Image (cartoon, rainbow, N blue to C red):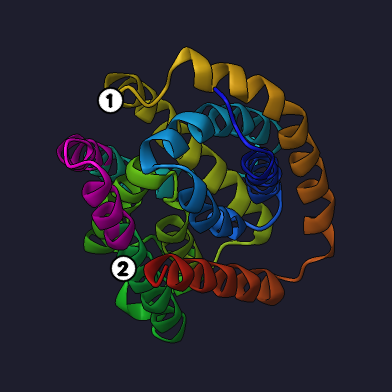
Amino acid sequence: MELSTIQWLILHFTAFMYGFNKTGIVGSAIICTPLMLLYFSPGVTLGIVLPLLVIADIITIYLLRQNAQWKHILKAMPWAILGIVLGWLIARYTVGMGAGGDNALKKIIAATLVFLVLFGYFLRLRPNLVRNAGADGSLATGTAKTWFACGMGTLGGITTMLANNGGPAWVVYLMSLNLGIKEFLGTAAWLFFIQNLTKVPFGFNLGFITMDTLVTNLYLLPTLFVGIAVGGQAIKYLSKRLFDNITQILALAGSLYLLFT
């Protein structure tokens, strides 16, 4: 795969941010989506990034394996797999439309992400709308309501299949559950790993993952590992409130940029 200098720079920045995203600020890698789509088609973007994400997920699961909250994972994951299948069908349709299909796909992704971020902010003010009370009667120990887990899981699956960008949907889902930072990251790690692994056969089927993209991945692995290491250190200095605010701001900024470019 012949790439320009600027394309290589974008790829290395993306690899770093996806690593940082796994162990640092979940959702921060959303800024990579508009950058990648400026220089690559959605298909090439998925083909290059997906194998990196699977590797990063495996490392993150090992590091945070004791912090996952499986009741939240199991409630949303079946819907995420449904969303991946729907995203695959949309991708198959738009691939045959050429440049027009790519542009339409970008706008669909951007509009969905903007909705998710704004919806997530609203839910921070009204958590009782989407969360059941726990056994002790507290919302803090409860699980997501079924309709909410269904909606966020499906949207997360669709957006991750189309643009490797299911993060905003999962951020909205997990932030509504009032998890601590480590529980948030540990639960997110398993959600991302399961959905990304599910996407691999679809990526091959669509012709997005090829030998060229896999070879490109090899050059990006060192940068990915640096991002994972930096994110693991950065999270030690972030408060829960700062963590949530940074995640929301980055998600909204990236989504709006993608929508209007």
Q: Which of 103 and 63 is in front in this view?
A: 103
Q: From the viewer's perspective, is 221 left or right of 92? A: right
Q: From the viewer's perspective, is 153 left or right of 16? A: left
* Position above or below: 21 against 194: below
Q: Which residue is drawn at 76% across and 50% down?
A: 231
Membership of 94 in magenta stretch: yes
What amino acid type is highlighted by mark number 1?
Leu
Membership of 77 in magenta stretch: no
Dividing the image into 4 quarters, which one contains the N terminus? top right
Determine whether the residue tagged by mark 2 lies in a helix, strand or loop.
helix
Residue range corresponding to the magenta coloring: 84-108
In the figure, residue 229 lies in which quadrant?
A: top right
* Position above or below: 137 against 110: below
Dot 2 corresponds to which residue? 111
Q: Which of 85 and 255 is in front in this view?
A: 255
In the rendering, which numbered label is found on residue 95?
none
Q: Which of 71 and 101 is in front in this view?
A: 101
Q: Residue reaching furthest bottom?
A: 125
In the rendering, which numbered label is found on residue 206?
1
Let me know if residue 53 appears in the view.
yes
Task: Bin the neighbour count of mark 1 within 10 Å (Cα to Cα): few under 14, some 14-19, many 20 and up.
Answer: some
What amino acid type is highlighted by mark number 2?
Ala
